Image: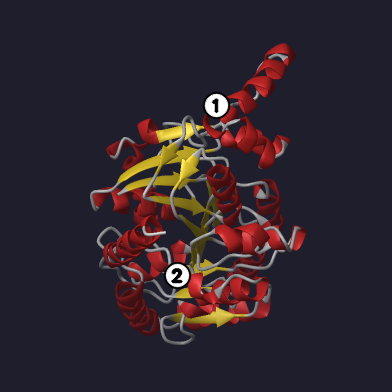
Amino acid sequence: MKIAAIVTPFPALSETFILNRITGLIDRGHSVDIYASQPRETDEYVHQTVLDYNLHDKTSYETKPASTPLLEIYRRLQAPLSIIKYSGVFRFLKNYPGKKKIRNLTRFKEGKKYDLIHAFFGMNGNLAVQARKLGILDGPIAISFHGIDLSSEIKENPSIYGELFQKGDLFLPVCEYYKKRLIRLGCPVEKILVHPSAIDVKQFVPTDKNRSSTKVSIISIGRLVEKKGFIYSIEAVAEYINENPDKEITYTIIGEGSLKNELLNKVRAYNLISKIKIKASVNQEKIVSEVQASDILICPSVVAENGDEDTVPNVLKEAMACELPVIASRHGGIPELVQHKENGLLIPEKNIKAMKEALDQLVNSPSQRAEMGEKGRKFVENNYEIESRNDIISREYIKLAQKYSER
């Protein structure tokens, strides 16, 4: 099949789920054109997968703001003209996309017919509908939802997906939690298929380690933003370290984001810079080694003030595949992955006391960590293995394309 993938800034270190889907389709013989808003990574931090699959050459970006006011005026005039070229004057005026969307639509360099258009995130689903109405693209539209698009975006504009629910062909929330939310918002249930993001269990594998109750390495990975809840995990780990001076506990957070200075100041306030580290984002290969070298992963997700939520963070699956026990919030779709007291421990959001108690339980029981780790890997292998998941979605795409062609 010939597939269009509509994405946000691309490629992004934190969005391996998009890379996994695109490369999985390519591996199955499909041709994929990527339409992104703008580049995000530098070559220094780019995933090796991007280079291996030559994804930069498959990607078109929207028109960038000009460097001078006169050139910007010219580009603003030129953008609708390029869209009219493929849509026609009448169709353009009838379906006028609005000033904000015109630049977004400039990433589509020519009118093309696809067997499938896949939009990552609901907001890009709206863009896909607009492009199809204008005749810039043609093909059935599938939309995957990943968190922010069904949380803070909905809080800001509850009716944002009204037209999308009518015009979209397949809706792919990554968990049952968000399937229920889609239904409440008015999405036809017959158009919904839960399709979790998956990981490569051949890449994330356990390593032999000497599990100790006195020397324990804890890790968290994610963007340094409010919904990740790292301010609470720093507080819990810091208090636990100070309350257990006989134990050698270290805590590493890997990620970049707007709260970096705030988190660093929190660590400094506890005078624990030597034991609690905040490291910059790294590529997938380095993530694997960092997780494998750790003993426990904490995922302290919270609902942000603006309503933004996590779904089922891939880092949980990656850690579990490496046979790490996890401590995670009862948040979003996380309880669909983390089975309390089986492959990890679930705690209430923002609850420092509960997090410390969970830490104490796992730190002092290496045998329980090993047992939870084994169960966690098995659960991920059975439910989130990338090859089987990509096979499933490829078959669904083919069925959708056939159904659309018969209209």
Kind of residue at badge 1: Lys
* Image location of residue 189, percent across then percent down: 54, 76
Q: Answer with the quarter of the image where residue 72 lies.
A: top right
Near-viewer residue (371 or 149): 149
Identify which residue, 12 or 351, lies in the foreground: 12
**CA–CA distance in space, label 2 to label 1:** 56 Å
255 with respect to 102 (left or right): left
What secondary structure is marked by label 1? helix
From what the image shows, is residue 336 above or below residue 58? below
Q: In the image, which is nearer the foreground, mark 2 or mark 1?
A: 1
Q: Name the residue under label 2.
A: 296
10 Å crowding of disc 2: few (<14), some (14-19), many (20+): many
Vertical order, 255 against 169 (above or below): above
- Residue at point 50% right, 53% down? 120
| Relative vertical location of residue 6 with respect to residue 235 in this rendering, above or below | above
Residue matched to label 1: 85
Q: Is residue 362 visible?
A: yes
Q: Where is residue 372 in the image (x, y as percent from the top left)?
A: 38, 81
Q: Earlier in the sequence, mark 2 or mark 1?
A: 1
User: Residue flagged by tag 2: what amino acid is it?
Assistant: Ile
Q: Residue 130 at x, y = what percent?
A: 59, 45
Figure label count = 2
Tell me the residue at 65%/61% (across/down): 227
The residue under the point 50% across, 45% down is 7
The answer to whether one can see residue 247 in this image is no
Q: Is residue 405 above or below residue 32?
A: below
Q: Are marks 2 and 1 in contact (CB under 8 Å)?
A: no
Residue sitting at the far bottom:
341
Within-10-Å neighbours for mark 1: few <14, some 14–19, many 20+: few
Quadrant holding the C terminus: bottom left
